[in-house]
Amino acid sequence: MQQRVDIKYYDYMPYGEALSDGYEQNTPAQPYKFNGKELDQETGYYYYGARYYDPITALWLGTDPLKHKYPGIGAYVYCHGNPMMRIDPTGMEDIKIKDMTDYRWHNFDVENDR
């Protein structure tokens, strides 16, 4: 007898706006969505630890804690305006995807989101 495997998947635009939500029957609800963050159902925002993110406007809702480090980039801009090449796992500072083998990424604590 073949074992049944339930599948749940989500499709997103580059900045996190949901395109589709597909699943097989009897699949449990998945709280983790875009970038592995929980979606607040009431607001539609994702919480990254340092600040909230709105995938519809593609902007952070709080200013960049490190805005002094990047004076040419807006304080609310997500991933330097390049979500295909950068990721920001905590809302503090984005990382180039090609640098994800960097020390900071290897020591990222997924459970505690830092």
Image (cartoon, rainbow, N blue to C red):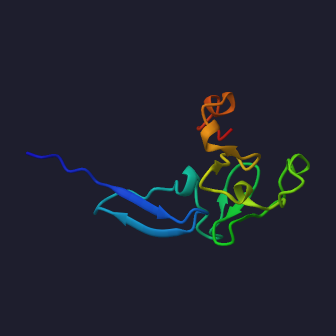
Q: Answer left or right for 17 relative to 21.
A: right
Q: Residue at x 65, y 65 (%)?
A: 45
Query: Which percent across, then down, holds residue 80?
Result: 74, 55
Q: Camera-side residue: 7 or 27?
A: 7
Q: On the rendered image, what quadrant is the N terminus found in?
A: top left
Q: Residue at x 61, y 36 (%)?
A: 100
In this picture, residue 65 sits left or right of residue 84: right
Residue found 40% across the figure and 58% down from its top: 9
Q: Residue at x 60, y 31 (%)?
A: 101
Residue 48 in the image: state x and y as whole percent. Answer: 68, 51
Q: Residue 31, position in %: x, y? A: 51, 56
Q: Residue furthest left?
A: 1
Q: Is residue 33 left or right of residue 79?
A: left
Vertical placement of residue 56 versus 88, above or below: below
Please tell me how many numbered marks the rendered image carries.
0
Q: Quadrant of residue 17?
A: bottom right
In the rendered view of the protein, which quadrant contains the C terminus?
Answer: top right
Q: Quadrant location of residue 39?
A: bottom right
Horizontally, residue 74 falls left or right of residue 39, namely right
Nearer to me, 49 or 95: 95
